Image (spheres, rainbow, N blue to C red):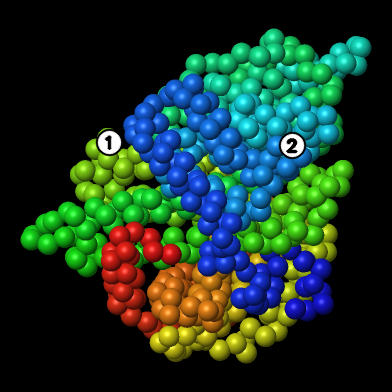
Amino acid sequence: MKDNDSKMAGGGIFLLRDVAIQEIFTPEDFTNDHKDIARAVEDFIKGEIISRGEEIEVLNNELSRELMRKAGVLGFLGIDIPEKYGGMELDKISSAIVSEKFGYGAGSFGLTELNHTGIGTLPVVLFGTEEQKKKYVPGLSSGELIGAFALTEPEAGSDALNPLSTAILTEDGKYYLLNGSKQFITNAGFADVVFTYAKVDSEFFTAFILEQIWDGISIDEEEEKMGFHGTSTRAYHFDNVRVPVKNVLGEVGRGHVVALNALNMGRYKVGAICIGSAKRAFSEAVRYAKQRVQFGRPICEFGLIREKIGKMAVKIFAAESMMYRTAGLIQAALEELDKNAVDAGIRTAKTLEEYLIECSINKIYGSEIEDYVVDEEVQIFGGYGYIQGNHPELAYRNARPNRIWEGTNEINRTVIVNTLLRRASKGTFDLISAFHRVFEGLEKLKPVTSDEREGLDSQKRLTHIAKKILLFVFGIAYQKHGNNLREEQELIGMISDIITEIYAMESALLRSQKILHGKKPDKAPLPVKMSKVLFHDSFERIGFLAREALEALEDRELLEKHLRMIRGLMVSPAINTVALRRDIADAMIRYGGYSF
């Protein structure tokens, strides 16, 4: 790593340097404790949720509260909560495992649990005073209290930090009078604690802790939604709610810090739950393809069905690799913190903020892969996939909102690039220096023209080229627009998608290399094949996005020169993706689902 790169010591650093396999965490690194928590969640879901069948998908707030208490007794609601407040205080790997498992089998209840443990609890865990934590966190950890996060307003969706809700300090200085409305609030029908946001004196965006039973708080009827029918979604109305001054969360005027950090971890958890959902959809699709007989044989034996299974498996492998890599990065950073420090929560939030880029990447990639997989599940089931009562119909409806909440995927794409721009302006991401180094050496780079059959050296070189191309395109965009690049959202979307593809490729590559050079190299052939297919597809997309971005940035003469260079580099070696996907599909079919 160059000296001027070393300033950027956390999130996003992968864009500036090569990453060693020892630096990443993978599912193959799970400890016995990780495996135990996974089995415990699976047992709970089988015994308490799957056993109830369709009952889980019908709105029943009393049932939801009952299940939340049972999950609390088992510790699942307190994974991210310190022991001193009744939590389990497990690592972020365990947190990701729990979210993934709930995504796999909990249906609507998975969303109830996700919102409660993420944005419905973390605001007070991270930013609460000692008095606030002692009062609310033990109940949130046990499930005796249910949390809700009320940020969205009828006129303030993605522009969430500019609400119409107001809070005015009373003359005696003891209360804030809160007025306004919030909508699309998960768990609102049976919540006890509400984290909400308003502008103090119509100017200072501030976070508050409310208790739903307080006078002046009313809720609308349940929303009738496309999916997640078993979850509560209502609107809040605040009419001169008297909020004690001691229930300000964080500092007056610093509510954005509370909201964005809670959302950041929420995004990461959404990514995990989407991967669990995608794995379930994949397993259901494989199971059906093995038993559905047409033209005298199971449809899993037909080429186009095997192609679908192979493609789905590759995408899930990449998403899973990214998610646990990110969990490992966050956990490694958190281990350096003093858990007993008075400001431990705030320091934890700052650490989470460091990986804002990776959390947004996981949310985007996880939710879009989930959508891809459940769509193909419907296709494999054919007409039966469209019929209510079959898994694909439910999975299809429940998958769709994951691209909307915790910040739409469009917002998260801007978060990725805007975070890098902000760090560039602070000097912690030296984009211009990186661009100049890349520009000077780009013409000397050679394309990767051959691929070794069993190794991944070619893919490692392709990753190196992809990062150079990204820095080249990003640098040109920054030179032309500076910080005004924030307003060029089409360009931001292209750059963000390149960054996401690179993170996916590199995560799959490093995981496969780690298996290949680890204690069980006999398990490497399948992930190596999946990585090769992923690179073949993703590298081509990066080239397309890079060309599209340059066409929007440069004049004709310079554009033609740079496009020639891009075309010369953005070619991947020829591989037989048809054969590789067949091998991948055959392995998954033999296993009966996702085998990694």
**Residue lying at 73% horizontally and 14% vertically, measured from the top left:** 241
Q: What SS does tag 2 mark?
A: helix
Q: Which quadrant would residue 166 be assigned to in this image?
A: top right
Answer above or below: position of 161 versus 408.
above
Disc sitting over residue 85 in the figure: 2
Is residue 230 in sight in this rendering? yes
Considering only vertical position in the picture, is 22 above or below 125?
Answer: below
Nearer the observer, 536 or 281: 281
Q: Which residue is mark 1?
A: 389
Q: Where, quadrant-wise, is the C terminus in this rendering?
A: bottom left
Q: Is residue 190 above or below residue 255?
A: above
10 Å crowding of disc 2: few (<14), some (14-19), many (20+)? many
What residue sits 45% from the left and 47% below the top?
42
Looking at the rendered structure, the kind of residue marked 2 is: Tyr
What kind of residue is marked 1?
Gly
Residue 212: image location, x then y, percent: 65, 18
| Residue under the image location 66 percent in, 14 percent down | 213
Report x, y in % for residue 18: 65, 77
